[in-house]
Amino acid sequence: MAIQNLPTQVFAGQRPGTSGLRKKVAVFIQPRYLENFVQALLDVLNGLAPDGQVGTALHGQTLVLGGDGRFFNRVAVQTILKLAAANGVQRVLLGQGGILSTPAVSAVIRRRQAFGGIVLSASHNPGGPDGDFGIKYNASNGGPANETLTEAVYARTQVLSQLRISDAPDIDINTLGSCQIEQMQVEVIDPVADYVAVMRDLFDFDMLRGLFKQGFTLRVDAMNAVGGPYAKAILEGELGAPAGSVVNAVPLEDFGGLHPDPNPVNAEDLIAHMSAAAAPDLGAAMDGDADRNMVLGRHFVVTPSDSLALMTAHARLIPGYRDGLLGVARSMPTSAAVDRVAKALGMDCFETPTGWKFFGNLLDAGRVTLCGEESYGTGSSHVREKDGLWAILFWLSLQGATGRSVESLVREHWATYGRNYYSRHDYEAIPTEVADGLMSALRAALPGLQGAQLGARTVVVADDFAYTDPVDGSVSAKQGVRLIFDDGARVIFRLSGTGTEGATLRIYLENYEADVSRQDQPVQAALADLIAVAEQVAGVRERTGMAGPTVAT
Ligand code: VG1
Ligand code: CO
């Protein structure tokens, strides 16, 4: 075993997006591609002096490592261990088999007071040899690295000339226990245990066991991704849900051909079960790295924005939130349903750019307890990531505590607060120049749109969302073009920062309806006039040649 210094060459484009660096597997498996990014990360973590000399901040420290089990996960784990060993890391806590869900990495970092963690996942992106791979870094608070750090890593990737890597043989990552690479200790840990302990502290497991004893039924679709082992252990193992309540529960390298991006289109099998005559009481699905959740009741779909609003309204029913919430936060495109609840409860509601990293400071500073995004992400201060199974346990607990169905809880909520009709239209794989052209044209049109009459509404805000972090004062500009109308309706345009093929345009549409007798329309019909406005303003059809969105959720 020896540490080697190997010459390397710069790869273009290693800039992390909304959530880490995501590329096609074909890109990641190029010799030294992963190595370069990880070396740049370790250099930055070790502390770069102005002259580029690398410091020793990682020496004596512990890192957490694991991923969602997709293709290339196991190979990447071995490579990262050898780099970590050569760059002064003292100990790595590795999930058994290279497996750790994103929220579990966050939980392990926090519970074991690690320096940080590396998550191997492209999350909701497709997997397998022809799919995507990804890597992201989480800091000592358990949350995604902030933009200052990711930009520093990117800058380092662009000047890197040398790798420091051990030539040690691969280690056994399947067996619990310890081994050594160079001076570094590798501890293979149970990927589920720390996470289960966190959930036990938040939820009333006895009550939930009672619920299943009374015959409550549940179907959780883990979509052959990393959420399976966690859902099995907690729902079927700890809580006594009938065997088979969790389906597609074994993480597979290609997700068994499924696309673990839980929405009604990709999770059609779950939708079919929840629409059947004998549908279970609660249905849910998670994404590749188990930080997203989609929740359904019998014959009823809950939008993520509504989910956040209901969680906020009922949080005190859950033991972990018995004393109330410090505040809430949502990403800008997420519907304003939660804002109304926060107002009624007299708590702060923050509006952040898209991406979980923007919630970290608010959570660390004790300004908020719950956070959510329209993209099927909800979470709380228990970790610093969104958390799919946590959300499922939350909804299970709401039903246990109230004895009410999902549908009746949501309808009651709409009756009290009004309904925010909401939809996101995605136009995928647009040529980058076309997408950039569309966004620049929109930005250029903003001054003229201010005060404009569009359909039956008047535009009261036409801007490009910019966020000043209330804790550290950092500014993130150009986070999405917003049109906000006089009646509170909104149309928002932004480009995805997680895609790996061309560009993906996301159009977010929202319309508020207070009148209970008008709260039962089909969503796309209720938003039809805003859809027309979006087309009128952006000319998506003409610019892209696409007749409609690839996916509407
Ligand atoms: C998308 C979602 C965003 C989410 C991000 C990461 O980003 O819109 O809300 O935080 O994915 O989620 P974008 O830039 O493609 O719109 V995950 O579960 O894929 O890490
Ligand atoms: Co995810």
Image (cartoon, rainbow, N blue to C red):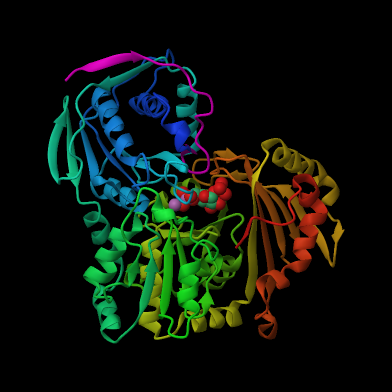
- Magenta stretch contains residue 215: no
Q: What residue is shown at x 19% (from left), y 24% (from top)?
A: 168
Q: How many marks?
A: 0
234 sits left or right of 369 in the view: left
Question: Hey, which quadrant is residue 183 in on the image?
Answer: top left
Q: What residue is shown at x 39% (from left), y 26% (from top)?
A: 44
Q: Position of residue 7 (x, y in %)?
A: 37, 13
User: Which quadrant is home to the C terminus?
Assistant: bottom right
77 sits left or right of 361 in the view: left
Q: What residue is shown at x 49% (from left), y 27% (from top)?
A: 154
- Magenta stretch contains residue 7: yes
Q: What residue is shown at x 50% (from left), y 72% (from top)?
A: 271
> Which residues, given as a range, are shown in magenta?
1-23
Q: Position of residue 122 (x, y in %)?
A: 44, 45
- Tell me if I can see residue 317 in this picture: no
Q: Position of residue 435 (x, y in %)?
A: 70, 41
Question: Hey, which quadrant is residue 500 in on the image?
Answer: top right
